[in-house]
C-alpha cells in the first residue's frame, strides 16, 4: 500500500505564519504538523512508500525536511508546479498527479497534510481489509455548526455509505467525514474519469458523493478526535493538545 499526503495548499487564512512556510511544517511543540502525521503512518506495516504532494513555492522546504527523516518507509516529495493560491490545481487533481507521477498501481491511503488525529491508522487499515471496499472515516459530532462546516454522511446498518453532503445547511446525520480515505487500486482510474468529466477538483470530499454512485464505499467510525488546522484558533488549539502530549 502507498500513502499520499496532500499538502499543496497555500493556507492564506493563516497568513502571515504561512506566507513563507507551508502549513504542514508549522511547529507543534518540538515537532511539526507533518512530523506528527508521519509518526502515525510509520506504524502501518503495509505502507512502504509515502508521497507528499506540494507546490513549487514550498517544494524545497519539504525536500529539506525529507532529507532529515529516518523512517523505514521511502518518502518522495512531488512538486505540482503551482506557485500561488490563484493557480493551484486542487486536492483531487493533486491526487491524480501523485498517482500518475509516482506510477502508483496499488491501494492508497490518502491523508490531508493539515489534519491531526489520535485514532490508529492500523485499525483503519484492518477495517478496510475486512470489508474489501473503498473506505472513508467518520466520527460523531454533536454541534450543528461543526457539522455545517464539514462533509456529512448517511450509512446503512452495515456502515455502507448511502449519502454524502458537503457542508450541509441541514445535516441528515451527525457523522462527520475527515479527509482520511483508502481507495482500492481498481478505483484509481475513476479519479481521472471524475476530473475528465469537469467535476470540482478542489476539496477531496467532493469525490466521495460521485464515487458512491459507482462503487460501494464503507465508513470506518473512529472514537478519537481530529483537528482540522485551518485558522489561527484551530492551530493554537492543536499546539495546546499535541505539544502537551509530546511533553509526556
Image (spheres, rainbow, N blue to C red):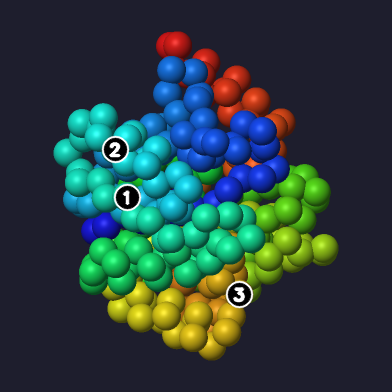
**Mark found first going from the N terminus, 1 or 3:** 1
Q: Identify the mark at residue 19; answer none if there is no mark.
A: none
Q: Are marks 1 and 3 in contact (CB under 8 Å)?
A: no
Spatial separation of the CA atoms under disc 1 and disc 3: 24 Å
Residue at 50% from the left image edge and 24% from the top image edge: 28
Residue at 62% from the left image edge and 31% from the top image edge: 17
Q: Please state which of residues 229 and 52 is positioned toward the viewer in this rendering.
A: 52
Q: Which residue is mark 1?
A: 77
Q: Position of residue 26 (x, y in %)?
A: 52, 31
Residue at 26% from the left image edge and 30% from the top image edge: 68
Spatial separation of the CA atoms under disc 1 and disc 2: 8 Å
Q: Is residue 43 left or right of residue 137?
A: left
Work out which quarter of the rendered image holds the C terminus and state it. Answer: top left
Q: Which residue is mark 2?
A: 66
Is residue 111 shown to the viewer in this render?
Answer: no
User: Please, which residue is most extreme toward the left here?
Assistant: 72
Q: Nearer the viewer, mark 2 or mark 3?
A: 2
Compared to residue 202, the image places residue 40 above or below, namely above
Compared to residue 46, the image places residue 15 above or below, namely above
Q: Which residue is mark 3?
A: 200
Amino acid at each position: 500500500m502507498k500513502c499520499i499526503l496532500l499538502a499543496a495548499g497555500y493556507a492564506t487564512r493563516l497568513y502571515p505564519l504561512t506566507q513563507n512556510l507551508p502549513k504542514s511544517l508549522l511547529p507543534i511543540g518540538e515537532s511539526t504538523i507533518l512530523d506528527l502525521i508521519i509518526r502515525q503512518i510509520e506504524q502501518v506495516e503495509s505502507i512502504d512508500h509515502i508521497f507528499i504532494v506540494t507546490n513549487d513555492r514550498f517544494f524545497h522546504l519539504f525536500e529539506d525536511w525529507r532529507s532529515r527523516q529516518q523512517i523505514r518507509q521511502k518518502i518522495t516529495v512531488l512538486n505540482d508546479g503551482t506557485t500561488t493560491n490563484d493557480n493551484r490545481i486542487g486536492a483531487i487533481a493533486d491526487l491524480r498527479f501523485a498517482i500518475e507521477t509516482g506510477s502508483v498501481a496499488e491501494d492508497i491511503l490518502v491523508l490531508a497534510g493539515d489534519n491531526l488525529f489520535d485514532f490508529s491508522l492500523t485499525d483503519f487499515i484492518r477495517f478496510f481489509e475486512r470489508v474489501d471496499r473503498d473506505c472513508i472515516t467518520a466520527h460523531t459530532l454533536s454541534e450543528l455548526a461543526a457539522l455545517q462546516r464539514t462533509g456529512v454522511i448517511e450509512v446503512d446498518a452495515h456502515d455502507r455509505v448511502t449519502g454524502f453532503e458537503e457542508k450541509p445547511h441541514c445535516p441528515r446525520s451527525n457523522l462527520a467525514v475527515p479527509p482520511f480515505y483508502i481507495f482500492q487500486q481498481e478505483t484509481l482510474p475513476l479519479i481521472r474519469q471524475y476530473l475528465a468529466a469537469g467535476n470540482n477538483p478542489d476539496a477531496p470530499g467532493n469525490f466521495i458523493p460521485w464515487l458512491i454512485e459507482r462503487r460501494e464505499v464503507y465508513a470506518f467510525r473512529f472514537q478519537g478526535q481530529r483537528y482540522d488546522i485551518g485558522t489561527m484558533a484551530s492551530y493554537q488549539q492543536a499546539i495546546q493538545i499535541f505539544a502537551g502530549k509530546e511533553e509526556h
